[in-house]
Image (spheres, rainbow, N blue to C red):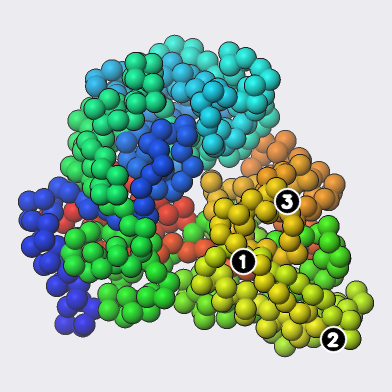
Amino acid sequence: MPRTLLRTAALTSVLALTIGSQALAQTYFRGSDGDPETLDQHKTSTVVEANLLRDMFEGLVTLDSTAQVVPGVAMEWDVSLDGLTYTFDLRDDAKWSNGDPVVAGDFVYSLHRIMNPETGAKYASILYPIKNAEAINSGEMDIDALGVVALDDHTLQITLQQPTPFFLELLTHQTGLPVHPATVEEFGSDFVQPENHVSNGAYTLESFSLGDSIVLTKNPEFHDAENVAIETVQFLPFEDRATCVRRWEAGEVHSCSDLPAEDIGRLESEYGDAVHVAAYLGTYYYSVNTTREPFGDARVRQAMSMVIDREFLADEIFGGTMVPAESFVPTGISNYVEDAPRFEWADMSMLDREDAAIALMEEAGYGPDNPVTVEIAYNTSENHRNAATAIADMWSVLGIEVTYNVRDASAHYANLRDEKDFDVARAGWIGDYSDPQNFLFLVESDNDGFNYPAYMNPEYDALMDDAAAETDLAARAEILADAERMFLRDNPQLALLYYSSRSMVSEALIGWEDNLLNVHPTRFMSIAE
């Protein structure tokens, strides 16, 4: 038997001994990236919370094990010809964990709650496509003006501000999950406590011990309960990724949600297919401050991008756990053209790229005799530091001299968002939903929060407006592709790498499917007996 199979067989035996054969068939010990800040779906903002909430609640639509949109509480839906009105038919057998029926009014209540400014929802903007949502959340309109109405207990109608072809994808975000109105009214913010908690998903909240574990148990009232194999889920928080790996190796957890990059090689060598490194919906990039010279010159930005060896960064700096980027929008994204835009020079050799980049710098008036000084800002991380050092060396061929500015993550992003006091700054974006708009909107002129490079291009904005108004998905995809081609020409942000998800998964855990959103609902998995 090959060494990998021997180790996997040994691990399965350890799991059986450590967890116990009976518990093994029923309980999923799930490593998590840390503790949630909240279990209130309207105040959530992290992936940790999303994984928990998706196990406990079901929205109008949901994501399956491959991250595809499938029916949830809504069995089917109809979209008006103008793309503005969605009518959802709710299933008759949807129930809350206390036995109450799930009705359309519950979603009206929930959507009112998240848009109410008093709720303080961090991610309310996800649902701004709903008619009047932004104005209500900004305190400019009354909550009753929200474009949501229950036509009857089993029919919900949502009207949008403008056509939003990816609206169903937005509803899969945890902010679209419903709350149980009576429980929220009775207990206020304490509705998230285990003794008060009422859910409508595959699992209910059994206990929550900060720093220790969150225990979920199967919800017998869930409409698909007969197909939910795992009885209990224990979410175990691990701030230190290496600690989860050690627990996995000891047979104490079935999966780890992230892995230390520096240990990937050893883990792959020892455990083979148990290590899952998969494409993830995110881009690691450098933002270039277009308001500062010479970075306002697109030729300079293009040259800086061309000489970066992305394969070296992916393989040597990030240990093969990132993918070299050839565009800003990650490959494999939904609602896009088949032949997606790439860097025009993507197929050139590094030597040819360097020659072309040097010529661009000379054309712009820069080179070794007239060097450019660049400060690279990044948030504290060994990987970010090593990447910045490597890129500085790559830029030296252009006569660029580099200094560094290192801050903690909160100060770094506050500077990018508010002060914009930088030359070039590391950043990253993980998509909230699988649609190119969620990446290309970052540099729209009026997106003050995320347009770090202060890119101002009326033609680009017009394309994004045209895409927002287009209801035909194929035509919309072509418009967005034109916008990305313009983005890649101007390079306000230098796409470097696509993120990857990194997980350890026991052979005993059946049904884990790698996917672009790194979504793994427990209800679709089982534990081998």
Label 1 crowd bin: few (<14), some (14–19), many (20+), radius 10 Å: some
Q: Earlier in the sequence, mark 1 or mark 2?
A: 2
- Answer left or right for 306 relative to 17: right
- Residue, disc 2: 368
- Which SS class for mark 3? helix
Q: Earlier in the sequence, mark 3 or mark 2?
A: 2
Structural distance between the alpha carbons of marks 1 and 2? 26 Å
Q: Residue at x 46, y 18 (%)?
A: 109
Q: Which residue is drawn at 23% across and 38% down?
A: 207
Query: What is the x, y in percent for residue 34?
Result: 36, 52
Query: Looking at the image, is 251 positioned above or below residue 365?
Result: above
Task: Check if mark 1's residue and mark 3's residue have beta carbons within 8 Å.
Answer: no
Label 3 crowd bin: few (<14), some (14–19), many (20+), radius 10 Å: few
**Residue type at tag 3:** Glu
**Residue type at tag 1:** Val
Q: Residue at x 82, y 50 (%)?
A: 456
Which quarter of the rendered picture does the C terminus lie within?
Answer: bottom left
- Residue, disc 3: 419
Query: What is the x, y in percent for residue 439?
Result: 63, 51
- Residue, disc 1: 406
Q: In which quarter of the image is residue 296?
A: bottom right
Q: In front of the other: label 3 or label 2?
A: 3
Label 2 crowd bin: few (<14), some (14–19), many (20+), radius 10 Å: some
Indicate which disc residue 320 carries. none
**Residue type at tag 2:** Pro
- Answer left or right for 425 relative to 241: right
Query: What is the x, y in percent for residue 515?
Result: 43, 56
Q: Which residue is drawn at 36% across and 64% down?
A: 241
Q: Which of marks 1 and 3 is nearer the N terminus?
A: 1
- Residue in front for this viewpoint, 352 or 179: 179
> Is residue 136 something that shows in the picture?
yes
